[in-house]
Amino acid sequence: MRLPTALPRLPLTARRALAALLAIAAAVTALWPRSAPETVPVLVAAHALAAGAALSPQDVRVVRAPPDLRPEGALAEPAEVAGQVLAGAAAAGEPLTRVRLVGPEGTALAAGPGAAAVPVRPADPALSALLRPGSRVDVVAPADASSAARVVADDAVVLAVRPDEPDTGPLLLLGLPRTAAHEVAAVSLRGPVTVTLR
């Protein structure tokens, strides 16, 4: 038995019909709506933000990102940052997470579990210009009539540096073990303290 050497040719009208069907299939495939990739809301800085800034919903915006690009603890709603204080500077478009805000999560991450945050006013306001979130300092109480100057807490972590205010000066937020934080808070009630850089 002998095999045919060539396939039979389709009539011209059949070939044109097949070409038209293939063109229609290509057009339908190109125009068919594709499912959008899954995204989640992520809160980012709307503009450059300074460390210690009190945030408002106008300071942030919501963007959509793939779930695997969303940082752990990322915020999603502008209302979540209203009145919160930013621990460190943030660039425009940078995602904001709970640990970037002054609060229990950031304090625990920076100073360890069970740590507390305590605000202090430095005796020398110019000192605050040398400090950044993450700096390590010792807190020194000034001498008074009943005692000499003394270190009341060592190895405190600077959580935030609030800007200099005309009537009160800058404010440092320090992360310390809870008992040391209580001691620093009691001493700072009597007046400004100084810190030494480590």
Image (cartoon, grey):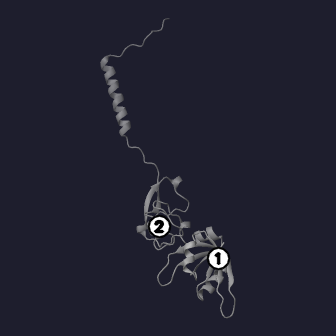
| Of the image marks 1 and 2, the number of the one nearer the N terminus | 2
Q: Of the residues shown, which amino acid type is indicated by label 1?
A: Thr
Residue 42 in the figure: left or right of residue 151: left
- Number of numbered discs visible in the structure rendering: 2
Packing grade of label 2 (10 A; few <14, some 14-19, many >=20) is some
Looking at the image, which residue is at 65% across and 91% down? 144
Q: Secondary structure at mark 2?
A: loop
Closest to the camera, between mark 1 and mark 2, is: 1
Looking at the image, which residue is at 62% across and 81% down? 194
User: Outermost residue toward the bottom?
Assistant: 145
User: Outermost residue toward the left?
Assistant: 13
Q: Of the residues shown, which amino acid type is indicated by label 2?
A: Leu
Q: Nearer the viewer, residue 75 or 23?
A: 75
Looking at the image, which residue is at 48% across and 69% down? 50
Image coordinates for residue 15, horizontal then vertical, percent: 33, 21
Whether residue 191 is situated above or below residue 77 in the rendered picture? below
Whether residue 36 is situated above or below residue 117 in the rendered picture? above
Q: Is residue 172 visible?
A: no
Q: Nearer the viewer, residue 54 or 4?
A: 54
Residue 196, disc: 1
Cα distance in 3D space between marks 1 and 2: 27 Å
Residue 88 in the figure: left or right of residue 14: right
Q: Where's the C terminus, which quadrant?
A: bottom right
Packing grade of label 1 (10 A; few <14, some 14-19, many >=20) is few
